[in-house]
Image (spheres, rainbow, N blue to C red):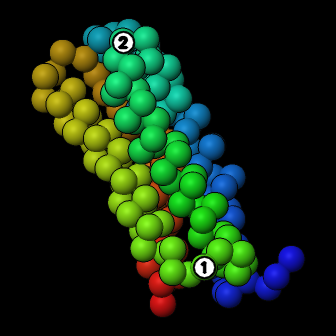
Amino acid sequence: MRAPTSWPLALANLSLLVLFPIAWFAPLMKAGLLPLFKLSEISVISGLQSLWGSDVFLALVVTVFALFAPYLKTIGLALIHFRLMSPRLTPILGVMGKLAMADVFLIAVYIVVAKGVGIGRLEVAWGMYLFTTCIVASLAISIFTKR
């Protein structure tokens, strides 16, 4: 294996290969119809499962943004860090990172809309923070890799 261009960046990036799948299965939010009933946990994966049953196009778009874009970007950055891919491809990976950030925005919009309607109860869970941290860390790693 070749020595990475920067060990801290390479290790941080490789940790995302483990943290992203954990964040996909972690509860993003807890939702319930009425305050008296138990809240059900919603994760990226459970949300995608329900989307595939109701709106295939939206499910495909969210799958690309939430799963494929950040993971492929992380793999691409690892290849650059270990000098297995040309650094000239870094801008393409930056675009993939911006696409991945779009799903965090989409989830935030859903939370605002759900809370605004006021019919049910919605609580942000620890997975939302983990997922957002993974996306932001990936963006930061990408920025520092360019330098």
Q: CA distance from mark 1 to mark 2?
A: 41 Å
The residue wearing badge 1 is: 86
Label 1 SS: loop
Q: Residue at x 66, y 55 (%)?
A: 17
Amino acid type of disc 2?
Ser
22 in relation to 77, above or below: above
Q: Examine the image and state in which quarter residue 1 appears.
A: bottom right
Quarter of the rendering containing residue 58: top left
Q: Which mark is residue 19?
A: none
Of 82 and 131, nearer the camera is 82
Q: Is residue 57 left or right of residue 70?
A: left
The nearer-to-camera label among 1 and 2 is: 1
Spot the residue most to the right.
1
Vertical placement of 7 versus 100: above or below?
Answer: below
The first of marks 1 and 2 along the sequence is: 2
Q: Residue at x 59, y 70 (%)?
A: 77
Q: Nearer the viewer, residue 147 or 107?
A: 147
Identity of the residue furthest to the bottom in this view: 147
According to the picture, the residue beneath numbered tag 2 turns out to be 54
Q: Secondary structure at mark 2?
A: helix
The residue located at (63%, 43%) in the rendering is: 22
